[in-house]
Image: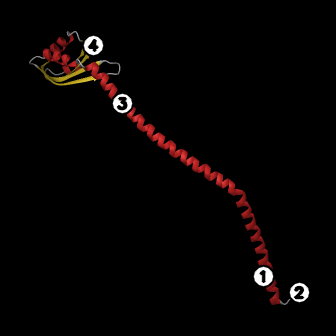
Amino acid sequence: MINLVPAAGLKAVKNEYWLRVVSVWLLLFGTVCLVGTVFLLPSYISLSAQIYDAQNAVTRLHDSSTSFDLSTAQIVVANNQAQLLTNDVQVAGLTTHIASVDSYVQSEITVTNYALQVSPDSTVTFTISGQADSRAALVAFRDSLEGHDDFLAVTLPLSNLISNQDIPFSLDIVIATSTTSS
């Protein structure tokens, strides 16, 4: 029967046929997409809510982490201040030790610096820096400090004894901790 249709009409029938085929397929594709969207919409809503909750949880955790970091920093500062206060209690009587060291200083010895160091095990170390006119004066100064009852040890590095005259020195004196707390 298609043979009875004129050539111009045959072309129009073929165009209309393919238009209808494409239209049906597009309508089926649209229907499948619509049905898929309807089925996936609850999942999308649920996942969106879960993502929103997770973002809020992360924000809350970040805020609490920030406050925890601030609290940690404040605790570190408080611990350092407490350590300084306990060191101050131990070091309270050290002015008498400075006076004791000054009483042993001879005219050949010039003390330029006192430094104090308290170790975590409560060992108090004085470091005295200065200049000695001669090696003999420096050794005599060290020996006189070793004779003091409150000084547990007096350390003079051998490198300080290399020169004969105008000797820069550094003495380390370990002080008995029982005498510093009184």
Of labels 2 and 3, earlier in sequence is: 2
The three-letter code of the residue at mark 3 reads Ala
The three-letter code of the residue at mark 1 reads Asn
Of labels 2 and 4, earlier in sequence is: 2
- Residue at disc 4, secondary structure: loop
Residue at left 33%, top 25%? 83
Quarter of the view holding residue 90 = top left
Q: Is residue 63 above or below residue 9?
A: above
Q: Which mark is residue 3?
A: 2
The three-letter code of the residue at mark 4 reads Ala
- Residue at disc 3, secondary structure: helix
Residue at left 34%, top 26%? 82
Of labels 4 and 3, earlier in sequence is: 3
Q: Which mark is residue 176?
A: 4
Q: Which mark is residue 78?
A: 3
Tag in front: 2 or 4:
4
Quarter of the view holding residue 17 = bottom right
Tag in front: 3 or 1:
3
Q: Is residue 91 visible?
A: yes
- Residue at disc 2, secondary structure: helix
Q: Disc 4 and disc 1: Cα gap in Å?
A: 111 Å
Residue with the mark numbered 1: 15
